[in-house]
Image (cartoon, helix red, strand yellow):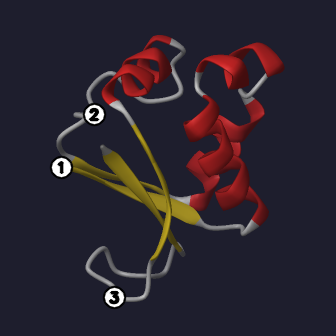
Amino acid sequence: MLDFFFIHDEQANNSNQINLAGGIEYEEFIEAQGLKIIEKHLDYYGKFRWISQNVQQKRVMLTPAVTAVIPSLASILKQAFAANCGLIAFGD
């Protein structure tokens, strides 16, 4: 599972005050890479961060067809957009 947490742009990566946004399975990660929502160089088992501007850019890409293919990630992006914050992801 790749877990996403809400994080404000000014917060440090190691902040204890981040809240779980949700997670995606490997298959959804691969689909999101194919749709160019997740960058090809990112690793499912790694760690990465998107600032709020990245979230906004990705939110614009969420058409109904894209949302149907990556429902969990689409929901996470919509929540982060509504909260005006970024996301940090940790693979396990």
The residue that mark 2 highlights is: 42
Q: Is residue 84 left or right of residue 34?
A: right
Instruction: Tell me if mark 3 has few (under 14), some (14-19) or many (20+) residues whose alpha carbon lies within 10 angstroms of its own.
Output: few
**Dot 3 amino acid type:** Asn
Q: Report, in whole angstroms, how far the alpha carbon at label 3 lies from the one at label 1.
A: 18 Å
Q: Is residue 55 left or right of residue 32?
A: right
Q: In the structure shown, which secondary structural element does the residue marked by tag 1 occupy?
A: loop
Residue 25 x/y as whole percent: 37, 33
Q: In the structure shown, which secondary structural element does the residue marked by tag 3 occupy?
A: loop
Q: Report, in whole angstroms, how far the alpha carbon at label 1 lies from the one at label 2.
A: 14 Å
Mark nearest the camera among 1 and 2 is: 1
Q: In the structure shown, which secondary structural element does the residue marked by tag 2 occupy?
A: loop
Quarter of the figure with residue 75:
top right
Question: Residue at image x 49%, y 59%?
Answer: 87
Nearest the camera: 34 or 64?
A: 64
Mark nearest the camera among 2 and 3 is: 3
Going from N to C along the chain, the mark reached first, 3 or 1, is 3
**Dot 1 amino acid type:** Asp
Question: Residue at image x 42%, y 88%?
Answer: 17
Tag 3–tag 1 contact (CB < 8 Å): no
Going from N to C along the chain, the mark reached first, 1 or 2, is 2
Q: Is residue 37 left or right of residue 17?
A: right
The residue that mark 3 highlights is: 16
